[in-house]
Amino acid sequence: MEIVNFAHGEFLMLAMYVAFFAWLLARLDPVVSFPLAALVLAGLGWATYHGIIRWVLGGPMLAQIFATFGLAVFLRSAAQFLWGVDFRVVSAPLLGGRASLGGVFVGLPQLTASVAALGAFVALHLFLARSETGLALQATAQDRQAAALMGIDTERMFALGWAIGAGCVGVAGALLTMFFYVFPDVGAAFALLAYVTVALGGFGNVPATLLAGVIVGLVEALAGLLIAPALKYAVVFLLYLGVVLWRPQGLFGRF
Amino acid sequence: MMLEARGLDVLLGDYQVLWGARLSVAAGEIVALLGPNGSGKSTLMNTISGLLRPQAGQILFQGRPIAGLPAHRIVGEGLSHVLERRRLFPFLSVRQNVLLGAYSPAARATRDDQLDWVSDLFPVIRQRADQLAHTLSGGEQQMVAIARGLMARPRLLMVDEPFLGLAPRVVDQLTEVIRAINRGGVTVLLIEQNVERALALAHRGYVLESGRTVLEGRSEDLLRSAEVRRVFLGG
Ligand SMILES: Nc1ncnc2c1ncn2[C@@H]1O[C@H](COP(=O)(O)OP(=O)(O)OP(=O)(O)O)[C@@H](O)[C@H]1O
Ligand SMILES: [Mg+2]
């Protein structure tokens, strides 16, 4: 809320390490350990809000940007220092192989991850739209002062927002280890795609982000197939540039 | 006194806006807070409701000191504040906006009764229940904003410029509703630019000039005062 987390990719990387170590040390498969990753990351999000974000929120724009940017650099370096730069893999995951969906073959891990991501989306949307706390969270994001005057503890809502955001990254990162290797810089590429997706849909709008995610995925796949695999991200970013030039607030954005 | 504020110094950044401002409101009154643009009226109200912290001074609400308490705690004491320019949650529905007014635990228990009451005061709440707040007209938004403030079951309702930008017919309508709310037992403190209009509605008034309380009195006395004319007409 009100601030973009430039350490999003590093949060993803940490979630992946949580899942990796859960597998390495306790033989827990990512499909089992993802709630643990979500919890650890939610804690990290909460701590990040209280330790860093709330101190820079009212401050100058540059301080806001560099605070999370600095956190990103720190987390990446810490990961390199602690766990090295090797690529790590969760081998022989529980769910391997491929499933056939009406003649189309899809990797089972990828399918599981998509279903889980959709589930997380639906849960988040229902929470925000239906629950008392979800409404308070939306109110805080839309007008912090007015929300405080309703009796909402807006500090708590901000911390909760950071915990939920990071918790979702926890789910994503853990499931990603089923088909992607883990290394300290792994977050960078995914984070860029995530910003593009969120900005494409419009900040602060969960269903729009879901739709933008589908669009980005389709464009990426089609561009890879029809033009050249090496150019698929270039096409995605071109699309993004086109959209923000035409509608700076994103396709369905409000702000 | 229901509300008593004394000696308030308030800084916005490095700039001191209030210089020992004071004001008090007795139970059952309608009090107008007057003053030229930039004299600090909104700043004073924001300080009372806890959005700003005073550098110095005291605020007592029903005998309890509230200066320095966070805003979300002050609502629970029975003090509601309707901000300047309505400030509804633009992308929530009218109904959601109004219900959030009863978010604090003290008000939540009787939320449905409150909702019936404010919906009778402002029929627009039923008519536009599912519409997003930012799609309402200015007058409708002001009604929803006041309704939202009333949902907290306040003893004191503070409204910052409720008539700003509204058509005369809507102003008359709102004036009547504010009277009705007051007759129903809610004390009212309101900010209004138009001196005559404000004092026609209020029992008493305060005049703020450059962050200082320079005048106070009963409405009929203030209306006749040469000093009021000097402050507002610069004469
Ligand atoms: N965030 C801010 N930072 C610095 N100065 C501010 C800020 N907000 C308001 N001011 C200044 O503080 C003074 C008082 O502002 P305030 O909004 O309280 O006045 P007001 O009496 O409500 O005016 P109006 O009738 O225009 O609403 C003004 O001179 C204004 O320029
Ligand atoms: Mg004002």
Image: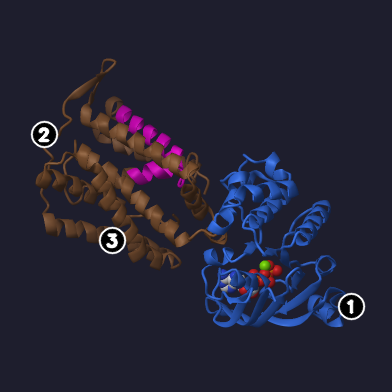
Chain colours: A brown, B blue
Where does label 3 land, which residue?
Answer: A71
Residues packed near mark 1 inside 10 Å, few (<14), some (14 to 19) or many (20 plus):
few
Type of amino acid at the residue the image marks with label 3? Leu
In the picture of the structure, the residue carrying the numbered disc 2 is A92
Q: Quadrant of residue A98?
A: top left
Same subunit under labels 2 and 3? yes
Q: Secondary structure at mark 1?
A: helix
Q: Looking at the image, which residue sits at the far right?
A: B224
The image shows residue B84, relative to residue A138, as above or below, that is: below
Q: Residues within 10 Å of mark 2 (few under 14, many from 20)?
A: few
Q: Residues within 10 Å of mark 3 (few under 14, many from 20)?
A: some
Is A214 or B21 nearer to us in this picture? B21
Judge whether residue A213 is colored magenta: yes
Which chain does the numbered disc 2 sit on? A
Q: Is the distance from the Cβ of mark 2 to the nearest ligand 1 atom less than 8 Å?
A: no
* Ligand 2 quadrant assignment: bottom right
Quadrant (top left/top right/bottom left/bottom right) for the C terminus of chain B:
bottom right
**Percent from the top left, x then y, of residue A26?**
11, 45
Residue B92: x percent and y percent?
A: 57, 46
User: Which three-letter amino acid code belongs to the residue tagged 2?
Assistant: Ala
Establish if A110 lies above or below A11: above
Residue A22 in view (yes/no): yes
Disc 1 designates what residue?
B224
Magenta-span inclusion, residue B15? no
C-alpha separation, residue under disc 3 versus residue under disc 1: 63 Å
Q: Is residue B149 left or right of residue A85?
A: right
The residue lying furthest to the top in this view is: A103
Q: Which chain is disc 1 placed on?
A: B
**Helix, strand, or loop for circle 2?**
loop
Give the distance between the C-alpha atoms of the residues marked 2 and 3, in whole angstroms: 33 Å
